[in-house]
Image (cartoon, rainbow, N blue to C red):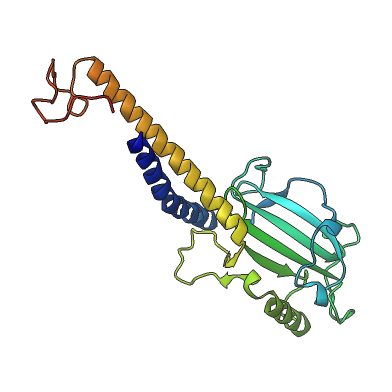
Amino acid sequence: MRRRKYNRLTKVIVSIPLGLVLCVFSTALLLTYLKSWSWVSSGPTLNPDSFEATYLEPIAPELVAVRHHSPSTGNGSFALTGINLGADMVSYCYGVSLWDEGYTPWDPTVDAEPTSVNIMRYRFGWPMRMLHYDDISTGSSIADPIVFAYHQRANAIAGIHRGLDRPSWLPGFIPLYRVPIAVNWFTLVINVLTWSALCYALMSCLSWLRAWIQRRRIKGGLCASCKYPVGDFERCPECGTEIRIA
């Protein structure tokens, strides 16, 4: 009985760091191999009143629409909706929504301030999103000095939400646009615990399978370790293992 409790405690202690490693590893795979620019909408426009104000509100028009997007295949022809792949995108539309018929890109020669601003928030993590970076767009070229100045101001306010620039040493076949550094610590803990629980379940299954194999060998008159015929011996004459059911 004491040995079983010890084994369970050992599994718990081992599963937590393993869960952390798997959580980080799986998120790294999502960041480096999921084409984050191929997204399709998985549902209708969400109610913007149910979302808290973002950092961009002081320098942007009123928030008018929020929409959730799911990843698609490389060419965008097939939506992987209803499947938790560990990544998604939420778009926040200020001023005129991207999906409104009256949407037009910001023309700085007509309006000093943008008429439409969008935050595309790319989120990563399984089963819950724990990392994100934001892509801010006004629909106009930053070659214009007015547009460029606005983007500089917006990016400064965004801070860590913008993430880091793509590393120059990263191979070209890895479709990582930016490196997210904004962490949701609550969902990070949930993800680590989920991966740890999966590790614990896997180790328990392996232990059960190992014990079942040993029982089968002992009932067949074999050593549980080396499968040597033991007969009525209390210890295996080949490897010295005590003949007992694990």
Instruction: Residue 131: tell me if it is visible.
Output: no
Observer-nearest residue: 76 or 91?
Answer: 91
Q: In which quarter of the image is residue 6?
A: top left
Q: Residue furthest front?
A: 2
Quadrant, the C terminus: top left
Q: Which residue lies furthest to the left in this view?
A: 237
Whether residue 214 sits left or right of residue 113 in the image: it is left
Observer-nearest residue: 3 or 52?
Answer: 3
Name the residue rendered at 80%, 59% in the picture.
51
Q: In which quarter of the image is residue 63?
A: bottom right
Whether residue 141 sits left or right of residue 112 in the image: it is left
24 to 42, vertically: above or below: below
237 to 116, vertically: above or below: above
Q: Quadrant of residue 231?
A: top left
Q: How many marks?
A: 0
**Rendered location of residue 13, percent (x, y):** 40, 49
Name the residue rendered at 32%, 27% in the picture.
211
Quadrant, the N terminus: top left
Instruction: Residue 204: tell me if it is visible.
Output: yes
**Rendered location of residue 229, percent (x, y):** 13, 18
**Rendered location of residue 61, percent (x, y):** 86, 71
120 to 114, vertically: above or below: above
Whether residue 44 sits left or right of residue 83 in the image: it is right
**Rendered location of residue 241, percent (x, y):** 16, 30
Name the residue rendered at 88%, 57% in the picture.
100
